[in-house]
Image (cartoon, coloured by chain):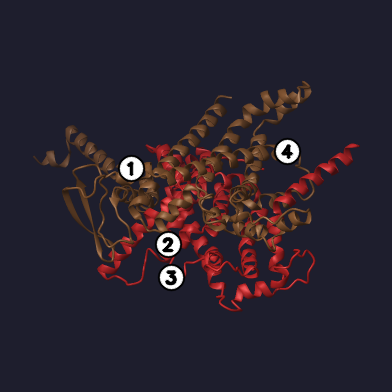
Amino acid sequence: MNSVMRTRVYYFILWLVALIFFLPIFWIVLAAFKTDSDILAVPPKLIFVPTLEQINRALFGRGQGISNTIPYLINSIVLSVSSVSLAIIISFLAAFAFSRYKIRATNFLMFLMLSTRMVPASATIVAVFQMYNAFDIGIRNIGITQEPVFRGFPGVLLLYTMFSIPFSLWILKGFIDGVSQRYDETAYVNGASNWHVLFRVVLPQVKPGIVAAFIFNMIFVWNEFLFNFILGTPKTNTLMIPYALAVGLVNPGGNFDWGYIAALSILYVTLPIIMIFFFQKYLLVGMTFGTVRGEV
Amino acid sequence: MSTNTAIPTVAERNEQALSAERKSVIRKSKFFSFPTLLLTPILVLFVLLNVIPTIWLIGFSFYRYSLQSPDAPRPACVDGPCIPLIVIPTNIQISPTRQLEIIIPSVPPIDNYIKIFNDADIWGSFGRTLTFVILAVTIQVILGVLLGFLFWGSARMPGRRLALTLLFTPMVITPVASALFWRLLYDPTFGAINFLITTFGGQTINFLTNNEWAFPAVLFVDIWMWTPFMILMTLAALGSVPKAELEAAEVDRMSWWRKLRFVIWPHGKFILMLGILLRTIDAFKTTDLVLTMTRGGPGNITDLIGLRLYRYAFASLNIGFSSALAVLLLITAIAFTSIYLWVLNARRRSEEEG
């Protein structure tokens, strides 16, 4: 076997491995373009007439007992973009302080922040759930508003912000550490203010870090299910597609509307897949909460 | 007299200079400084959403309190009702009808912890979770390292970016969605896997309700989801080996084993370790996968500790008991995190030395 052939076989094997890992997702993608009877066909159908019926149904809520998905989709986008943006601003400021001023307990604080991401989600929710309820009762008793504030959009937004912070902080601190202090000094000597150094000198140099933090926190919030499931209330419309997915599933009876679930799944997995295609070089940093840097 | 007011003496000038300095010290005091300003938002949020809930959690872990019972929260003393030493009423309304009373009893209110300690079901869950973590992480590491080495030389592969996207997709989509996909695949009547089994002459297996198959079926999905992560970490570990050293090893015609042992391992071990630790932490808290796939069943065969906590808290609404369990899991997570950071720092140190 000559070397050209060997390389070809090698690449073929690699592609095969990648495709095997993707196969289960491909199967659900296929299901979204099948009719109900095609999905439940025995034996499973590989060749069929594709239809947009399922996606149409899921997106615009056509059909029995199916609600319009577009509000959920909008909530997902609004919630993930706003909480992640807020988290990045907050952690950029903190990362600059940690990196440039010798703050006591920097390591300890960074450790605490990271450990919040390592705790089982249920443990966090048990605590936050009780606290949010108490806050809301308090707010109601004082008479500010009758609507749930913490068990509503603002509360969920804050929680997601908090969850996006550790990762953003770790990665941005790493990036700011990498920006030479000489830039700051030059700016200070020329009479720049602190804010100028922060936003005009350091910020432009850590853009890749901000992009990475944004993408991966966005995927996290997009994917998050438990917090929204427990803390969100239907009234405040903070429910996201994962919740909608799960409701279709948790409902007793056992007969799932697979076509609908498949179509929802497509709406839902598209964003993460597109993100890792375009931002692949941040994948490593993203999957390790910013603690390991490098490219694949 | 008049000269005195017009021209300050040396002593006065010194005094003025000193007080000016003092003023500037006050202005630059730590409390109002720029870094404090920068850190304020993160600290406020941290206290509001981490410190307070944690105190709340620890506090309730000493109470007997369920949302399902009409009783007010009482300290969870070991032997029935215990005599309160100090009662501090608060204005904090924990439910529409109840106010929180901080009660300091005469005996330590650690009944929840003792109950957990004596609960065979919880220990069973712990054991199962441990089995799950060990099996999942071991298989993922072995598969991930092997496949990582396989992908090592693929820098010039056509369509590499697309292939890697396909490969890494399982780990970026949520476990809830993956669990759903696999339910469709595992389905006994129209699932693709059972179709393959019957085609090759096997018997239909209802994977998720079968006592023997449920656990391996869930484990398999976890392996499918997270092996790509170990591939990623292996690629990163291999990428951290300096090219010059690899080339030198090539020139020296080192054997494959020696190259692995003396060139690749010293550089790659840290990232690999970090990967294994992160996987361990993550596998330990697996909740939504089993929640969506089996809800812990059949029986309690796939009942992992994360799911159990979820059920105590949100199905039986037993706040006191679940808080105690949450505290224990919190401590475990913090212990894991410290090991993780210890390895991370060890890596930094060794990089600085070498």
- Residue situated furthest right in the rendering: A1
Q: CA distance from mark 4 to mark 3?
A: 49 Å
Q: CA distance from mark 2 to mark 4?
A: 44 Å
Which label lies toward us, 1 or 4?
A: 1
Q: Which mark is residue B114?
A: 1
Which sits in the foreground, A284 or A262?
A: A262
Q: CA distance from mark 1 to mark 4?
A: 51 Å
SS type, badge 2: helix
Could you confirm whether marks 1 and 2 are on the same chain? Answer: no
Label 1 resides on the chain identified as B
SS type, badge 3: helix
Could you confirm whether marks 4 and 3 are on the same chain? Answer: no
Between disc 2 and disc 3, whose residue precedes? Answer: 2
Label 3 resides on the chain identified as A
User: Which amino acid is tagged 4?
Assistant: Trp
Residue that numbered label 3 is attached to: A236
Which sits in the foreground, B14 or A173?
A: A173
